[in-house]
Image: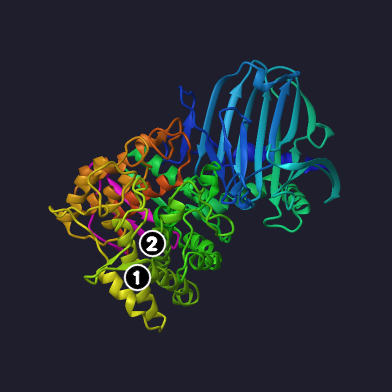
Amino acid sequence: MRQLTLSWLFIVMIWVSPLFAAETPFHHQGWVLSADSVGREYVPVCMANGETGILVGHDPFDFKQVILKSAFKRGTPQRVSAILTAVNPMGILLAIDGDELGNMKTEKWSQSIDMRHAVHQTSVSTDKADVTCRFRALRNLPNVLLADVEVTAHEDILLTAKNYHSVPDDLTDVNRDERHLWCDYAWRRINRTWASFNDGADKVVASSLFLCDEGVEYHSAGFLTSRLKRGETLRFSVAGAVTTTATFADPWTESERQVVYVAHHGHDAVVAAHEKAWERLWQGDIEIEGDEKAQRDVRFALFNLYSSILEGSRQSIAPMGLSSCGYNGHVFWDAETWMFPPLLALHPELAREMLNYRLDRLEAARRKAMTFGYRGAMFPWESDAWGEESTPTFALCGTLEHHITADIAIAAWDYYCVTRDRKWLAASGYPLIRDCARFWCDRVTKNDDGSYSVVNVVGANEYATGVTDNAFTNGAVKKSLEAAALAARICGETPDPQWGDIAANIRILRFDDGTTREHSTYSGEMIKQADVNLLGYPLGVITDAAALRRDMAYYADRIDPKNGPAMSHSVFAVQYARLGDAEQAYASFRRGYEPNRREPYGVIAETATSMNPYFMTGAGGMLQSVIFGFGGLNITEKGLVRVPSVLPGHWKRLTIRTADGKVFTR
């Protein structure tokens, strides 16, 4: 029995399944993004499942590089460590009567991204056939990618389909073979490629197979043909799996096993499980009534954030998620300060994976502290798979941007505040928070007047290097040390008295008019991103309304409008919403991402002038504007609570739904 048993399933899927865009048109509930024409700008969307990501471009089979979150290339004398660009098993060449689709004149191009079901669809027409490709990065099978192809003939045609694997240039020892396995009463024809990285110490393996309708003729595992009469439709799929020695002792067998699993269970069952997984994710959702554009943009930010993390993975999120190798796939403060809070509010179990990532690398942070002469834990500014400092040496932030150690401790405390999980706090959270506090006891300098300074540091504003008493760094130190003392008491420990002394006396500098001064020598120059204003939100170190307004008025136009990252103005939106200024809050919300929005789908780039999307940090900032600003949610010692806030004037209603069933409406 061949894969022909799948044919009926395919027919049912095509005609009655709710997976396709007809069920949710573009204007309906903000679930589908679509385009039927493209201007000068086209920025592709990343389809990912928390482990494997791939950019899907303009054309039906434009599957770009595959990125695996769990696999890293070690550093060499010429470069720092970097996330792996893997073998791509999703190469598809379609030819009609010998002419490749890419060389044929096409029309009626259309494309859509159904966020609810995480499926990307591209359709084109030629004079001989209509062609549609639907693509999923399977959430239920995080090493598997699935492309469904549908061809309807306008006249009698010979259709040829080839599956090939692309291998990045930096991989070595490339091997290719074709496997014929008698499995489940059928021959499984598997196309397989493997290669080496890390000087041969590690392997990456890709396997793929066709799932086909009747009427096809196999010429090899990666080559089939079919004759179609006018009006007939052929449907086939390509399932591709990518595995490495980073997660499997035997990636060769595992990559085969994954695609055989798809063939055995059947296309529809696998897709249904993918849908079910996304249904669980969308239990944490944001609904905006009265602003369709904001609804789509916010939900797209959530879609990308959810696509970047996987429960059970013990992995965090790099600034570009799985959309590119930007910043080498390293993990920064972006994770804890910008992406973590929305996940903590909507899906605490996903936020916990980001902390698991840090906990698994706590020993590396302790080693780094020891290396620099400190006690406790000193987390790297750019963290790789091993938790070591992986910032290029020309960038001083790798040596001096230490606020990340406080950011991580604050995230751990916030996780406890929301979940109230004392067992976790005692076993995992408090040891991390305590070791971060011990680092700060050694890192600060005590002044003659009894105050404390942090000397020679880089703050959130990375344009200022080697400064003293950076506002955000000192505010984060204060907040993390206060958290350490609270966590100690909850766990039955006695806090180190120095924690309270430093927290109470660390310097927050001000100009003569009371405006918070970014650092000891700051005199009004352009800054890279929000720094002082983070003391209002998320830190809550500054709470006086007049002081918040004064700081925002001073720094808003000092943020670099060309090269500053997307998320800065989101903290202004939160504070203005809580201060009751709906107009300023909405203006800041839009300013926080719209200059960085790229057509046709609203992919967010890091800066107003860059093209390096998707910038997950910007997504996190946008979502915080809505959840913690307009929605009025706030993380406190008592958990997730409501504080006064206002909606933009034209928003009729905002509903925030969390995965555990809570509903917050404003």
Q: CA distance from mark 1 to mark 2?
A: 31 Å
Q: Nearer the viewer, residue 460 or 64?
A: 460
Give the answer, above or below, for where 270 lies relative to 417. above
Q: Residue at x 59, y 48 (%)?
A: 83
Give the answer, above or below, for where 167 lies relative to 538. above
- Does 657 lie within the magenta span? yes
- The residue indicated by pointer 1 is 481
Q: Earlier in the sequence, mark 1 or mark 2?
A: 1
SS under mark 2: loop
SS under mark 1: helix
Q: Is residue 290 visible?
A: no
Q: Residue at x 72, y 23 (%)?
A: 95
* Type of amino acid under label 1: Leu
* Type of amino acid under label 2: Lys
**Front disc: 1 or 2:** 1
Give the answer, above or below, for where 130 lies relative to 621. above
> Which contiguous range is marked in magenta?
638-666
Residue 168 at what x, y percent from top left? 68, 38
Mark 2 residue crowding within 10 angstroms, few (<14) / some (14–19) / many (20+):
few
Residue 366 at what x, y percent from top left? 51, 68
- Does 220 lie within the magenta span? no
The number of numbered discs placed on residues in the rendered structure image is 2
- The residue indicated by pointer 2 is 662
Q: Nearer the viewer, residue 419 or 489?
A: 489
Residue 313 at what x, y percent from top left? 58, 59
